[in-house]
Amino acid sequence: MAKELNISVSTVSRALNNHTSISESTRKRVWQLAKEVNYQPNHLAAALRKGRSNLLGVMVPHIEGHFFSSVMHGIETVASKSGFNIMICQSNENVANERKNIESLMNAQVEGILVSLARNTHDFKHFDKVDNLAIPLVFFDRVLEGLNVSSVIIDDYLGAYQAVTHLIEQGCQRIAHFAGPQHLNIYKNRHRGYLDALRAHGLPLDEQLVYTCDMRTEDGTEGMEKLLALDVPPDAVFSSSDFSIVGAMQVLKARQIRVPQDIALVGFSNETFTSLTEPRLTSVDQRCEQMGQSAVKLFLEMLEDRSGSFSPRRIVLQPELLVRESSLRT
């Protein structure tokens, strides 16, 4: 463009940025040619020259269902107000994809990364490079147990404890549990809440009633079939996921087993479909939008801390049990 107009590259640059040092006639010539060649400014390159990309990387296991899409809405709301654009990656519940995505985000020069871990992530090694480069890193929802990292989570233990206590108050005595992979905080703490609620109310633990799975709909179907095959089936199921509990409901409907009269059901996450099933599913709400907003605010705190002395901080949000017809017996 500079060669065609017989002016310097710096003059073209200043003209495109409407710099006052460039005459009106020169600006018009530059902009006219820019339109003719369909010129598009490289905002990322410009930002990097200034030492800023204004990009925030976000990695989620998937964007299916209500939970992660609502978290993303919360993230985008706060990030955009702070001048950040979002770059989203999905691991599709695969740690190999998670590793590749981390590299992609760093190559894109993001200023921070928000992560919810894949189901089969067992270590933190692929995040070491992020930490070594002092890129602010915040985990949300799913975190590996024992890591001293900044994170935003729901009180999964309390949510599970409230759910099981509710079932006991409805007269349920033999409560089964769909438990997720125990190396992840959310499933481990929900399992603990289940166990402690049973103990607190004097109910025995029967290991046959605990079915560990990946929390998919098909896992709930398989788990319910196994529970119904027991000599004494359960009279309730508390699941660590709405997806697996809806799979259980499908089995019960096919067998004409009444919900909640014969078997009461409670899930976790308050997915949109929980209020559309028949009967509607009781579930624990995870404050998803608030979780996304809090994760960005925590990232901004880390970014503003120029001393490098920021100590990892954990924000714990309070859950809410949403009681619907699938668990109401009284």
Image: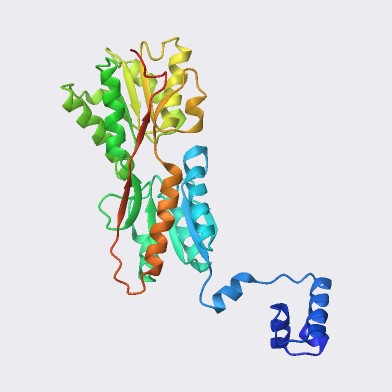
Position of 45 relative to 137 (above/below): below
Q: Position of residue 204 (x, y in %)?
A: 17, 22
Residue 306 is situated, as x and y percent measured from the top left of the image, at 36, 74
Relative to residue 137, is residue 201 drawn left or right? left
Residue in the picture at 34% in, 13% down = 329
Look at the image and tell me in which quarter the C terminus lies: top left
The tally of labels here is: 0
In the depicted view, which residue is nearer to us: 298 or 115?
A: 298
Task: Measuring from the top left, give residue 273's x and y in whole percent.
Answer: 51, 29
Vertical position of residue 189 compared to residue 263: above or below: below
Q: Quadrant of the N terminus?
A: bottom right
Tell me where residue 17 appears, x and y as whole percent.
69, 78
Query: How is the structure coloured here?
Result: rainbow
- The quadrant where residue 154 appears: top left
The correct choice, above or below, for 54 with respect to 175 in the image is: below
Q: Is residue 135 visible?
A: no
Residue 79 in view here: yes
Position above or below: 185 against 209: below
